[in-house]
Image (cartoon, rainbow, N blue to C red):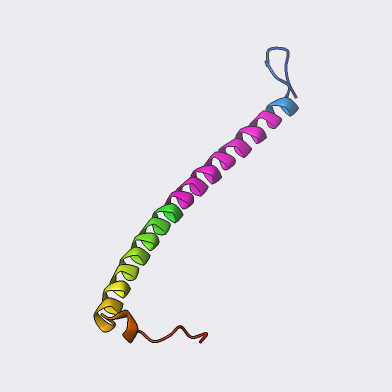
Amino acid sequence: MSTPSDPLPDSLERRFVELEMRLAFQEHALAELSEALADARAEGSRNAELVRHLLADLKKVRSELYSDPGDEPPPPHY
């Protein structure tokens, strides 16, 4: 129970404490999501770079195997 010298009634103070706890939880969750997003973006960049390297290597191999375009086999749909 609150006394005349208390600035807030107990029920209101409990609500403030609950809101502060919720806010702290949401801030923590937001920080975790932000970190996960940054990790996902970094992984996506690494994967894109890997694909670029693989495509460049594939082009080298194809050019060495089929230096004359006439030697290259037809696409599978022919």
Q: Residue at x 61, y 33 (%)?
A: 20
> Magenta span has 23?
yes
What is the x, y in percent for residue 16?
66, 29
Q: Quadrant of residue 47?
A: bottom left
Residue 68 x, y percent position in the rendering: 28, 81
Residue 11 lies, in percent from the top left, at 75, 28
Q: From the top left corner, tell me how far across and down residue 7 is, in percent.
A: 67, 15
Numbered label tally? 0
* 57 relative to 4 in the view: left or right: left
**Quarter of the figure that contains the N terminus:** top right
Q: Main secondary structure of the magenta part?
A: helix
Q: Is 26 displayed left or right of 47 in the figure? A: right
Of residue 75 and residue 48, the one placed in the foreground of this image is 75
Horizontal placement of 65 versus 10: left or right? left
Q: Is residue 68 magenta?
A: no
Residue at figure coordinates x 54%, y 43% from the top left: 30
39 up-or-down from 28: above or below: below
Q: Nearer the viewer, residue 3 or 48?
A: 48
**Which range of residues does the magenta coloring cover?**
14-38
Residue 56 occupies which quadrant of the picture? Answer: bottom left
Instruction: Name the side, left or right, on which 31 lies relative to 42.
Output: right
Up-down: is 68 above or below 10?
below
Q: Identify the residue shown where x is 34% and y is 64%.
A: 52
Asked if residue 52 is positioned above or below residue 67 in the image, the reply reads above
Q: Quadrant of residue 27?
A: top right
Residue sitting nearer the eye, 46 or 35: 46
